[in-house]
């Protein structure tokens, strides 16, 4: 078995030379065969993953959710894992706590356990956390644009972007097929969740399970403008129980058509479309957990070495 470490040196605010040195020391100490590869341009990790996509390989995303997204879009056979050195690390929040001892975190991940988890496919790409259509994708796009022009901390940028999006909401007519159920309505947002967090910690659902073969789906109807500033923050804060205009469903296979091209995002990657085919790939990816994971406690699930 070979361990392939794909490092995004532009992710987060870590010293990636230090991380590279630690990986080398830990692998040498444990007699592990490994390669360390640094990405050189956007989405380079996808092509690196494709070249190393073998059943006996473990491929590590060393960075944030963007790095993880790139790698899962490049593998079919390899085992996947994350060392959370990005800024958001939303997917990793479901897996294990982020510890301050970097050396410990790296070693205990390399020596960890393997579990099969769900992930999603939207049109021609894959995602771990979520695909969303509408206002929060607009928020994500504003944040990504502003990040290139400011040193304002990311959490504050999300707040600023949310206010900007609320001031000019973009509604759309949607036909939504949730397995055998059909819904037609004007929407502000449709969120399809495989993970529990996205957008730097937004967690609208408390009971997301990435082992059950279902997405948690949130549909927010068109909200009168004068009520929007009151109800939409409840979604971002995860306080959606019994909130008017918000409906929750579970589904495996989802088809959505909209009356216009609408901004959308999968794990932070923005795109426009008016047609979405989204499928839950049940336990279709092998994931290597760190030894200190809290996954067993959360899901009552056995893991293997």
Image (spheres, rainbow, N blue to C red):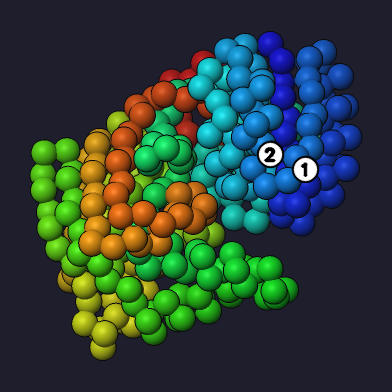
- CB within 8 Å, label 2 to label 1: yes
Q: Which residue is mark 1?
A: 40
Q: Is residue 256 above or below residue 144?
A: above
Mark 1 residue element: loop
Q: Which residue is mark 2?
A: 44
Residue 210 x, y percent position in the rendering: 38, 36
> Outermost residue toward the bottom?
226
Give whichever of 35, 52 is nearer the camera.
Answer: 52
Horizontally, is 304 left or right of 16 in the view?
left
Q: Is residue 34 visible?
A: yes
Which corner quadrant holds the C terminus? top right
Residue 167 drawn above or below residue 258:
below
Q: Describe residue 77's horizontal placement relative to residue 187 as left or right.
A: right
Q: Is residue 175 left or right of residue 197?
A: left
Residue 301 horizontal/vertical position (percent): 40, 25
Q: How many marks?
A: 2
Estimate how packed mark 2 is, as few (under 14), some (14 to 19) or many (20 or more) residues with alpha carbons within 10 Å. Answer: some
Quick check: 53 above or below 14? above
Rendering coords of residue 34 (x, y %): 78, 20
In the image, what residue occupies the spot 42% across and 77% down?
165
The residue positioned 52% from the left and 52% from the top of the image is: 269
Few, some or many C-alpha atoms within 10 Å of disc 1 (few <14, some 14-19, many ≥20)?
few
């Amino acid at each position: 078995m070979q361990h392939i470490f794909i490092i995004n040196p532009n992710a987060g605010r870590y010293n990636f030379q230090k991380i590279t040195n630690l990986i080398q020391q830990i692998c040498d100490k444990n007699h592990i065969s490994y390669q360390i590869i640094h990405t050189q341009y956007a989405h380079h990790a996808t092509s690196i993953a494709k070249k190393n996509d073998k059943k006996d390989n473990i491929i590590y995303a060393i960075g944030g959710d963007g790095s993880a997204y790139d790698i899962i879009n490049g593998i079919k056979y390899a085992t996947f894992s994350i060392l959370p050195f990005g800024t958001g690390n939303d997917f990793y929040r479901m897996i294990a706590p982020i510890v301050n001892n970097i050396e410990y975190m790296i070693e205990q991940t390399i020596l960890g356990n393997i579990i099969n988890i769900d992930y999603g496919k939207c049109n021609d790409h894959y995602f771990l956390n979520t695909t969303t259509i509408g206002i929060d994708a607009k928020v994500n796009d504003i944040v990504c644009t502003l990040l290139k022009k400011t040193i304002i901390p990311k959490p504050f940028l999300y707040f600023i972007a949310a206010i900007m999006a609320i001031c000019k909401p973009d509604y759309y007519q949607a036909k939504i097929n949730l397995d055998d159920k059909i819904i037609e309505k004007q929407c502000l947002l449709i969120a399809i969740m495989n993970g529990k967090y996205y957008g730097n910690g937004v967690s609208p659902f408390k009971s997301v399970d990435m082992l059950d073969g279902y997405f948690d789906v949130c549909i927010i109807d068109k909200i009168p403008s004068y009520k929007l500033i009151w109800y939409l923050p409840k979604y971002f804060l995860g306080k959606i129980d019994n909130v008017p205009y918000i409906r929750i469903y579970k589904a495996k296979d989802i088809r959505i058509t909209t009356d216009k091209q609408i901004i959308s995002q999968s794990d932070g990657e923005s795109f426009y479309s008016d047609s979405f085919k989204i499928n839950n790939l049940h336990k279709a990816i092998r994931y290597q957990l760190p030894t200190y994971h809290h996954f067993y406690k959360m899901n009552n699930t056995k893991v293997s070495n």
